[in-house]
Image (cartoon, helix red, strand yellow):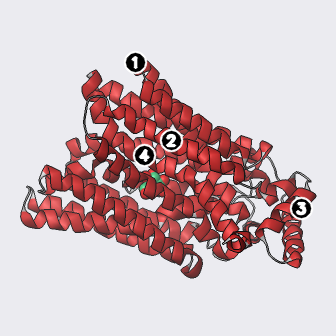
Amino acid sequence: MSTVFRSPGVRRHVLAAIASTGGLLFGFDTGIISGALPLIQQDWRLDTFTSSLLVAALLGGAVVGALIAGQVCDRLGRREIITATSATFALGAFGSGLAPSIDWLIASRAVVGLALGAISVSVPLHIAEIAPAKSRGALVSCNQLAITIGILLAYVTAALLGSDHEAWRHMFMAGSALAVLLGITSVALLESPRWLVWQDDEQEARRVLGELIAQPQDIDREIDRIKRGLKAETENRLGKLIRGRGRPEMITGIGLYFFQQFVGINAILYFAPSIFTKAGFDGQTAALLATVAIGVLNVLMTVLAMRLLDRVGRRPLLSIGFSGMALSLLAAGLTFMVFGEASGAQRWLVLLALLTFIACFAVSIGPIGWLMISEIYPTTLRGRAMSIPSAAHWLFNAVVSFSFLPLLLHLGDGPTFGLFALFGMAGWFFCRFLVPETKGLALEEIQEQQAARAAARPPT
Ligand code: BGC
C-alpha cells in the first residue's frame, strides 16, 4: 500500500484529487442555492429584488475573487491560495448558516463568492502545472468531475434536509464542512515547480519534481524545458500581452466561457424541475428526474470525458459536444413549440433532449473550458491571464441565470431553447476556427506553437 503511494504517478493523482476538493465546493454551492433559496424566500418573505440580490452577491463576489486570485497566484505561488480560499469559503458558508438578517446573509454569500472565484482560477492552474502533458486533460478535469459531484451532493443534501423551517441554514453549513476538508488536506499540496523555477528557486523545484517524477534524468529534462520556456516569455505585463501577441488566446478563453454559459447550462440545471413539470411530468417525478437523471448523467459523462481528453483530443470533443448541444436544444425548443401544451409525447421528448444536452455538455465544454484556460497562457502571466476568462465566466453565468425566467415569459419556452441552440451552433464555429489543439503538448510547447502562429500573422 505505502509503495503505491510512493509512486509518483499515484501521487500526482492524489494531489489532483485534493486540489479538486475546491471543485466540490464550487459544485456544491452551485447546486445548493436552488434548494435553499425557496426556503429563505418563504422564511423571510423576500421579494424578487432581494432574492436576485442574494444570488447576484455570490456571482459578483466570484468575479472579484477570480481577479484577485490571479494576482495572488502569480505573486505568492499556486499553493497557499487554495488553503486561504478554503478558510474564506468556510467563513462565508458558516456566516450564511448563522445569518441573523438578510444584509448579513447577502454579505456572507459575497464572501463565499470571493472564495469560489478564487477556486475557479487556482485549482485548474495548480493541477495543470504539476500534471505531465500526456495526462493533463484527465488530471485537470478532476476539478470538473468534483464540480459535478458537488452539484449532485447538493441536490441530495437539500432533499435529505427537506423543507423544514430554517433547513436552509444547515444546507449552507454543510458547505463549510466540505471547506474544512479542503483546508486540512490542502497542506499536503506541493508548490508548482514552474512557479518555483520562475522565482529562481531551482533547488525546491527539483525537490518537488522528485516527488512527481520517477527518473532523475526526466527531472533534469523537465527543469530545462521550464527554463527554456521562461526564457522565451518576453512579456510579463498582462495589458501588453493582451494588446499584442496574446490577444487570440484571450479571445479563446473568454469565448469558451461565453459559449459554455450561453448554451444555458445553469438555467437548465437550476430550473430543470420546472422545465420537466411544464413538459408534463408531475412535480415529484420532475424533481426526481432533475436530481437523479441529470445529476448522475453529468457525473458519468465527465468521467467519460476524462478518459477521452488525452486520447482523442480537445477539439474533436468540442465539435461533437457543441453539435449535440445545438441539436438537442433545437429538439427541446421544437417540441415545446409543436406540442404547445403538456402531453405524453412531449414529456419524453423533452426529457430525451435535455439528457442528450447534459451528456454533450459534460463530455465537452464542461471540462474543456477549465482545462484549456489552464493551458494556453504563459507561466509568468498564467494566474493573471486566467483570471480574466474566469471572471467573465461568472459574469456570463449571472447574465444567463437572470435572463432565463424573463426570456421564458416574453419569448416562450420554444424560442428560448431555440436561442440557446443558436449559441450552441455559434460555439461550434468558434471552436472550429479559434480553439487550438493542446493534447499531449507540454505547457511550454503550447507557448512555442502560439509564438510561431503569432510570428506568422501579418503585423497589425
Ligand atoms: C460550469 C458551471 C456549471 C457546471 C455544470 C462547469 O464547467 O462552469 O457553470 O454549473 O460545469 O456541470
Alpha-carbon span between mark 2 and mark 3? 43 Å
Q: Is residue 444 visible?
A: yes
Q: Please report whichever mark, 4 or 1, sits nearer to the chain's N-terminal start.
A: 4
* Residue that badge 3 annotates: 231
Quarter holding ligand 1: bottom left
Q: Quadrant of the N terminus?
A: bottom right
Q: Is residue 388 visible?
A: no
Query: Badges 3 and 4: C-beta atoms under 8 Å apart?
Result: no
- Check residue 177 in the rendering and tell me which mark sits there, or answer none: 2
Q: Amino acid at mark 2?
A: Ala
* Residue that badge 1 annotates: 101
Question: Observer-nearest residue: 376 or 136?
Answer: 136
Q: Amino acid at mark 4?
A: Thr
Image point (77%, 54%), residue name: 191
Image point (34%, 50%), residue name: 155
Q: Is mark 4 within 8 Å of ligand 1?
A: yes
